[in-house]
Image (cartoon, helix red, strand yellow):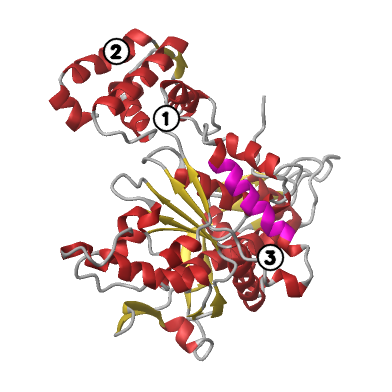
Amino acid sequence: MVIYTDSIDGREGSELTPREIVSALDRYIIGQDDAKRAVAVALRNRWRRQQLDEELREEVMPKNIIMIGPTGVGKTEIARRLAKLARAPFLKVEASKFTEVGYVGRDVESMVRDLVELGISLVKSEAEERVESRARDIAEERILDQLENMVTERAPLDDSDSDKKTFIVGHDGVVQSSKDAPKNKRDLLRMHLRQGAFDDEYIEIEITDSRNPVIEVFSGQQGMEEMDLGSVFGNMFPKPRKQKRVKVQDALKALTQEEAGRLIDMDQITQEALNRTQQSGIIFLDEIDKIAGRESQQGPDVSREGVQRDLLPIVEGSSVTTKYGVVKTDHILFIAAGAFHLSKPSDLIPELQGRFPIRVELQSLTEDDFQRILTEPRNSLTRQYIALLATEGMEIVFEDAAIETVAEMAFRVNDTLENIGARRLHTIMEKVFEALSFDAPDRDDAQFIVSSDYVRERLEGILQDEDLSRYIL
């Protein structure tokens, strides 16, 4: 059995060699070697930059990338997996949303603010993981204080018994300790708490109400923006606390989370998040081909060049004010992507073109690619359906011929209708399993073999009717 991890030998993604990064991406993405090599070098260059002296380090700018290829071939997935591998803040944004007619939403700087928020969440979750064990111990003590008031302790009925036992009596009956259990009442409670004996008991706990009121304010420059009153007033007012009656197992989770929040230093987390956002953040600009155009066009497309000029200072490197502090975008990696069916990268304004020096073309997926996508990745669709129906007590077995048939039909539909790449496999597989997923809870057979004939039976009628297939597949 192969055990998949998102790091190799315990190292972070930025410490991996380009070859190791490509190998890690191969676990989830089939083909597209040129794109994988390009992002692997970009990630490795970040590590190389950190090894330089400070003066030269500031001069080395990231080599932004444009991915060119049809939809569904892996552009977004490559960028997303790269960010996960590097444990870096990652934001996906559609460049076309800034061209919407009558758009009064947030400006292009909002994507940097969103990236910072993601960085805060990422660093905070890592910090909470580091203190989780200690936070759980503190939470257990708070729960034990409650349990001690709820239970009574009884001595053994027969004092002559050499194997004396202590009984803990709760609201719902008696919980007995084992022979070798500690005789201290609190230790006994702790042992039974960890064994789950009190999971369904209800206790009263007091926790902090972390909800902050949010209002929307209108800014002439930025349109409608959300304002978190908790961040505005800071610690001017103490956060309210509230009493809740919950089950012990739910109380343990809530109190552990609250105690973890107390154990971490939010100021330190904020600084770390700002630094990580500036030094290793990744912004994925999807549909950049939709803003490739010049002002000579009329109508709704007239804003295309304007959007490009708004994006330019962010990509070039500027300072963006956020509620956590000023963020410099000089070393954020921008990965742009687009199909470029009706336009080409040279249609972008020259200044923006120059900020994306690396261009890679992703290839359309073949029938063989579809077969590999169905079986090889760690999160392949076949594994997903096997796991989903296993929850109903049903074992799903795929014949090789069935996988070949699914790949063949997906390729045929893409070829005759709109080519949506690997996303077509989701539609095909869902249609194949539609009846089986519905009937699974009521079926008695423990095993179901997905054969080529079964796949054709579920799909052939739809494929023969081109008008019907346009709606269903």
Residue 17, picture quadrant: top right
Label drawn at residue 106 = none
Q: Residue at x 41, y 69 (%)?
A: 311
Q: Residue at x 44, y 20 (%)?
A: 394
Residue 214, picture quadrant: bottom left
Residue with the most extreme bottom position = 236
Badge 1 element: loop
Q: Residue 305: horizontal and vertical position, in percent?
A: 31, 67
Indicate the amino acid at tag 2. Answer: Arg
Range of residues picked out in magenta: 35-48
Residue with the most extreme right position = 162
Residue 312, picture quadrant: bottom left
Compare residues 60 and 319 and report the one nearer the observer: 60
Q: Which residue is mark 2?
A: 456
Q: Which residue is mark 1?
A: 365
Q: Taking the image as drawn, is residue 140 in sight?
A: no
Q: Which residue is mark 3?
A: 138
Q: Residue at x 52, y 32 (%)?
A: 31
Real-space CA distance between mark 1 and mark 3, rounded to the nearest whole angstrom: 53 Å
Indicate the amino acid at tag 1. Answer: Leu
Compare residues 461 and 248 and report the one nearer the observer: 461
Taking 47 as reference, is 56 above or below it?
below
For marks 3 and 2, the one nearer the N-term is 3
Count of numbered circles in the view: 3
